[in-house]
Amino acid sequence: MNLWVHDGSKDITVNRMKYRALLKDSLDQIFAQKYDHMKDCIESKVFGIGLESYTVGSNDFYIGYGVQNQKLITLDTGHFHPTESVADKVSSLLLYVPELMLHVSRPVRWDSDHVTIMNDDTLDLCKEIVRCNALNRVHIGLDYFDASINRIGAYVIGMRATQKCLLQALLEPLNTLRDYEETDRGFQRLALLEECKSLPWGAVWDMFCLKNNVPVGEEYIAEVEKYEAEVTSKRN
């Protein structure tokens, strides 16, 4: 159960402590009631429309609350400054909280929730999860809702992109890379990281699709078009 509060100030505020104390008290009351089979997640944001100057539930606030109360921290890839690496936050947080929740999106200038694609940000995030040996501690949720393109197609693109990034992370020769790093062989580490970029992971992906009886490559485009013609186009 993820909790995110859209609260803050459009212009300068002089009561930052007061509003964060109110949010802390509210969270304490919300989480006072325990539920079986429920994992509580809390989510920060750098800013929002109408609260450009001050966000009550900042990253610092929620990290402090999460560590103190051992809640799951939710990292939304669109909720940080464009120059921040969300991947870099994974290892730090996993030292202090039990698990993480991810909202994988594609921000364009701000938290615009474009369809997730196989870009450096998503790839770095997946690699960091695997490098931290944290697949059993990180919940990966996709967070995008682009209504300008076919919604089924958008879902498939984002899902396959994330799976491709995870696959590349799992195929990384991590033991060799770590051996290079631990023995101070920086040239070898960088050289192998560069070679990894052109490894034939695509063949592994195609075989994975074949074994799971799903379209290989761009074949899914026709399947989505067929579904649109036979199902979604007939909905009122």
Image (cartoon, rainbow, N blue to C red):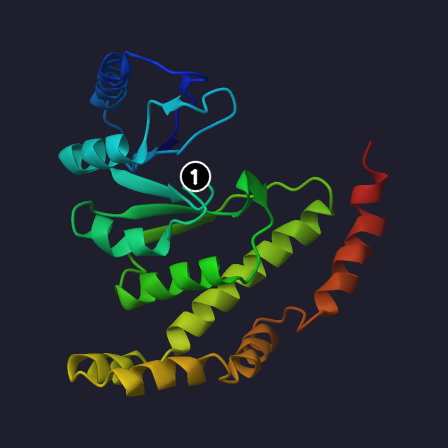
Looking at the rendered structure, the secondary structure element under dot 1 is loop
Q: In this view, does 38 lie to the left or right of 118?
A: left
Let me know if residue 137 appears in the view. Answer: no
Number of disc labels: 1
Residue name at image x 41 percent, y 16 percent: 9
Q: Is residue 17 left or right of residue 58?
A: left
**Amino acid type of the residue tagged 1 in the rendering:** His
Percent x, y of residue 137: 28, 54
Residue 177 in the image: above or below residue 36: below
Percent x, y of residue 92: 22, 52
**Residue carrying label 1:** 79
Percent x, y of residue 176: 27, 85
Residue name at image x 56 percent, y 42 percent: 113
Query: Which quadrant would residue 11 be assigned to in this image?
Result: top left
Dot 1, how many residues are within 10 Å of its Cα: few (below 14), some (14-19), or many (20+)? Answer: many
Residue name at image x 73 percent, y 46 percent: 149
Residue sitting farthest toward the front: 12
Q: Is residue 114 left or right of residue 58?
A: right
Let me know if residue 61 appears in the view. Answer: yes
Residue 112 in the image: above or below residue 14: below
Q: In which quarter of the image is the N terminus?
A: top left
206 vs 214, nearest the viewer:
206
Percent x, y of residue 86: 37, 51
Q: Is residue 212 left or right of residue 32?
A: right
Q: In which quarter of the image is the C terminus?
A: top right
Residue name at image x 24 percent, y 12 percent: 18
Residue 85 in the image: above or below residue 175: above
